[in-house]
Amino acid sequence: MSEQAKQQHTPGPWQSRWQEATDDFAHPIIAIETCEGAGDVAGIHYATRDGEDEANARLIAAAPDLLAALQAVTAAWLTEAGHGDGILEEHGPALDAARTAVAKATGTSPTGGTTP
C-alpha cells in the first residue's frame, strides 16, 4: 500500500449521534458520522449511557480536527526550530510525541528526529 493511500481518511468534521435500538438495530449504537451527511465513519455498538462510550465517541469524532491541529503545531515547531531559538532542546520530547501520533494516525513513519 502506498504512503498516500495509507493517509486517506473520510474528511472531517465528524460528529457522534445516538441511534436507539429499533427493528433494524437490536441494540443502541453511537454512530460517528460526517457532518455533511456522507454517512457513518464508525460506530460503538452495544453502547451504554455510562459516560465512557459517549466520551469515546466524542474522541473518535474529534479525530480529524485533532490530526489537523497536531500537524499544524508540528509544522510550526519545525519552522521555529529553523530559527535556532532552542525550541528543539526545550520541547523535543513533545515534538517527538506529536510526530509519532501523526504517524500513527496517517499510517506513516515519523521522519527524522528532533535534531536540526
Image (tube, helix red, strand yellow):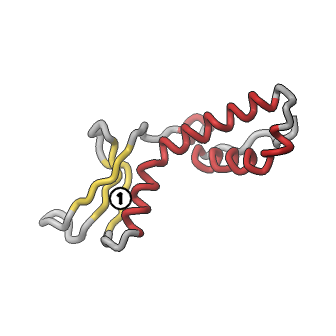
Out of 81 and 28, give the one closest to the viewer: 81
View extreme (top): residue: 83
Residue 114: percent from left, percent from top = 82, 42
Count the marks: how many? 1
**Residue located at (78% from left, 45% from top):** 91
Quarter occupied by the C terminus = top right
Amino acid type at image mark 1: Gly
- Viewer-proximal residue among 67 and 7: 67
Which type of secondary structure does the marked residue at label 1 adopt? strand
- Residue drawn 75% across the image and 33% down it: 78
Instruction: List the single residue furthest toward the left.
Output: 23
Q: What residue is drawn where x is 31% and y is 56%?
A: 31
Residue assigned mark 1: 43
* Relative to 104, residue 29 above or below: below
Q: Position of residue 1 (x, y in %)?
A: 59, 42
Q: Is residue 25 left or right of residue 101?
A: left
Return the residue nearer the eye: 78 or 86.
86
Q: Decide: few, some or many residues near mark 1? Use Cα within 10 Å; few <14, some 14-19, many ≥20.
A: some
Residue 13 vs residue 113: left or right? left
Q: Is residue 6 left or right of residue 95?
A: left
Q: Give x and y (percent) for residue 23.
A: 12, 66
Q: Residue at x 32, y 49 (%)?
A: 40
Displayed quadrant of residue 80: top right
**Relative to residue 75, is residue 54 depicted above or below?**
below
Classify residue 94 as left or right of residue 38: right
